[in-house]
Structures are given as structure tokens and as C-alpha cells.
Image (cartoon, helix red, strand yellow):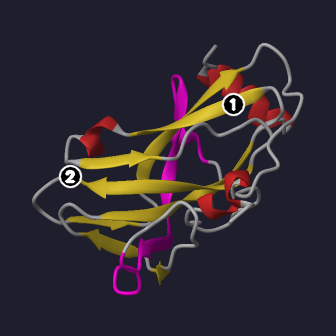
Amino acid sequence: MIISDSTIKELLKTGDLVIDPFEDVLLQPASIDLRLGTHYLKIDENQMEIMTLEDKLNYNEINSEQIVIPPHSFLLATTEEFIQLPNNLTAFVEGRSSIGRMGLFIQNAGWVDPGFAGKITLELYNANRLPIKLKAGRRICQLVIAKMDKKAEFPYQGKYQGQDTAVGSKVYEDTENEDN
């Protein structure tokens, strides 16, 4: 069940849900808008011929109050907000419709698992033929929170726990790669 704005407010007040910094303008009827942070990662295309699921990737790190995403380009960004979900809530990230209508696709890889704590790494793709300029602090996506039927038996303690900046793929740390 997706939780409502009034339930989100209650959970924030009790501290069961953490969104920091939080402002009332971020609250929507069935979600919370999140803002763009100042940290970005872009694959270092000059240092790699191919990407694999077994090898660590090279990224160029960018810290900036604004960024321009060229046409048909991909980069990772972070949210301004730190999120901490209790063990009975999960969430997913959706791009804002107004921004998607400009050709900017925004998502994160899968669910935000119960027990996750950190800033959310966003995957941004400019599907348009024109560059898109973004500024830190702008509402960029929305976090939709759902209540689980029970608390997670094994809340998230994975490789992205506690991230404070955009974090690149750690697929090379998957258990399938342990024999390589």
C-alpha cells in the first residue's frame, strides 16, 4: 500500500522515517519530491574500451551547483536529501512528469529497500536532441513510499548503504564474481 501525505508527515514527526533536509513544499499527496544535489559521476569513456559486469568502472567525478547533460548522454547524480527507511517501508523513485516531458529520464536502480540509509543515486539520461541544464536544489524526482505487510526479516545492509554522494555501479562486487 502506498502511503499518503498525512502518514508521511506522521512518520517524519515520530522519526520513523528520515528525510533530511525536509521542507513542507516537498510533500505531495502520495510522494515526497527530492531535490538534485551537487555530486555527479560520468563514465570515463577515455579509460575504458568496454564495460563488463566483472570489472570496476572508472568514473569522472563532478562537484557543481549546475550541470549540462548533452543530448543522448547518461550520468549519475545524487539527491540533496538523506533518506532513512524503517524496516517496514520500501520506496521507489520516479521522475517528475514535467521534467520527463523535456526528455530527461530519471530513475534509480530498483527499489529503495527497507532499512536503507543514505542519499539516493539517480540515473539521468537526456533522450532529447538538445542539452539540458540542471541546477542543484531543484525538485528532480519523487519518492513513493509503500508499507510492507511485515517488517523485513533482513533489512538492507548492502554495498550502497550509507552513501553520501553519487555512487557508481558496484556490480563487480556481486557474489557471481567471487570465483573470477
Query: Where does label 2 land, which residue?
Result: 127
Residue located beneath label 1 in the image: 90
* Magenta residue check for 47: yes
Check residue 71 for magenta coloring.
Answer: no
Say which quadrant the C terminus sits in: bottom right
x, y (%) of residue 81? Answer: 62, 55
Disc 2 + disc 1, Cβ < 8 Å: no
Q: Residue at 43% of width from left, 68% of height from top? A: 51
Question: Label 2 vs label 1: CA separation?
Answer: 29 Å
Kindly identify the amino acid type of the residue bearing the numbered disc 1. Answer: Thr
Circle 1: element type: strand
- Near-viewer residue (57 or 157): 57
Q: Amino acid at mark 2?
A: Ala
Give the x, y percent position of residue 78.
53, 62
Above or below, comparing residue 27 to residue 170 in the picture: above
Residue 40 is left or right of residue 103, and the answer is right
Relative to residue 159, is residue 61 depicted above or below? below
Q: Which of the marked residues, 2 or 1, is nearer the chain's N terminus?
A: 1
Toward the bottom, the furthest residue is: 47
Residue 111, given in percent of the width and then of the height, sits at 60, 36
63 or 18: nearer the viewer: 63
Mark 2 Cα-neighbour bin, 10 Å: few <14, some 14–19, many ≥20: some
Q: Position of residue 23 (x, y in %)?
A: 60, 47
Q: Nearer the viewer, residue 149 or 57?
A: 57
Q: Residue at x 50, y 79 (%)?
A: 58
Q: Kindly give the residue lying farthest to the front in the view shown.
A: 179
Q: Please tell me how crowded label 1 is: few (under 14), some (14-19), or many (20+) other residues with Cα within 10 Å.
A: many
Magenta span of residues = 23-49
